[in-house]
Image: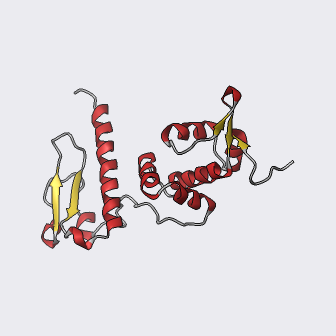
Amino acid sequence: MDKSPDAFKTISEVAEDIDLPQHVLRFWETRFTQIKPLKRGGGRRYYRPDDIDLLRGIRHFLYGEGYTIKGLQRILKEEGIPFVQAVGRGEIIPSPAPQPPSADNLPEAFATQEPHSSEPVAAFSAGLASTSSVGQGNLFEVAAPVAPVRELSAGRIKLLKAVLEDLKECERVLNRLKLPG
């Protein structure tokens, strides 16, 4: 017997519905405080339709758009639960997450540069500055535009700040994993 669309669903029904293992849904509850299924005796979870829309939105951002948990937490904080629920219902199609640079989408000056080179980037004179942190425990070189910030939209600035924070967190994790010698 099929349930009404407004009926509460168990974790097994939701997991099947959105094609995820139950343990992933439980894990998400620990990372996204916005997920609040009703819990009855024995800890059994019951999800409301809004909970399911939120889970679908989270799934879309993490798996469909490639966001990190931290990035999605930021979206939930800045845009709110209704936004992510609307994405889960397919009412809003969010802009795709920024993709990491590849040889296909790098400026020509970067694509021709030798990997791990500490030489200044050839594009320096074209308005780019190269900052190298090699030898200071960092694993990469960063070339950043020097263009005035006023030329970037507020949304782009917010996105760049989020990416920078994610990169700093990655660097902290990598530094903790360094082996002696």
Residue 152, percent across and down?
28, 70
Left or right of 95 on screen, residue 169: left
Q: What residue do we see at 21% from left, 59% from top? A: 143
Name the residue rendered at 13%, 60% in the picture. Answer: 120
Vertical relation: 41 (above or below) 158: above
Q: Position of residue 140 (x, y in %)?
A: 24, 49
Please tell me whether residue 116 is drawn above or below residue 146 in the rendered image: above
Color scheme of the displayed model? secondary structure
The image quadrant of residue 155 is bottom left
Instruction: Tell me where residue 131 sits by quadrant.
Output: bottom left
Who's the residue at 33% across and 43% down the image?
170
Q: Residue at x 30, y 63 (%)?
A: 157
For this view, does 37 lie left or right of residue 127? right
Q: Residue 87's x, y, as percent?
A: 56, 61
**Residue 165 at x, y = what percent?**
31, 49
Rendered position, 117 above or below 176 = below
Residue 92 appears left or right of 121: right
Depicted 11 relative to depicted 119: above or below = above
As drawn, which residue projects farthest toward the right? 1
Quadrant of the image containing the C terminus: top left
Q: Nearer the viewer, residue 168 or 112?
A: 168
Viewer-proximal residue among 121 and 127: 127
Based on the displayed image, in which of its 4 quarters is residue 110 positioned?
Answer: bottom left
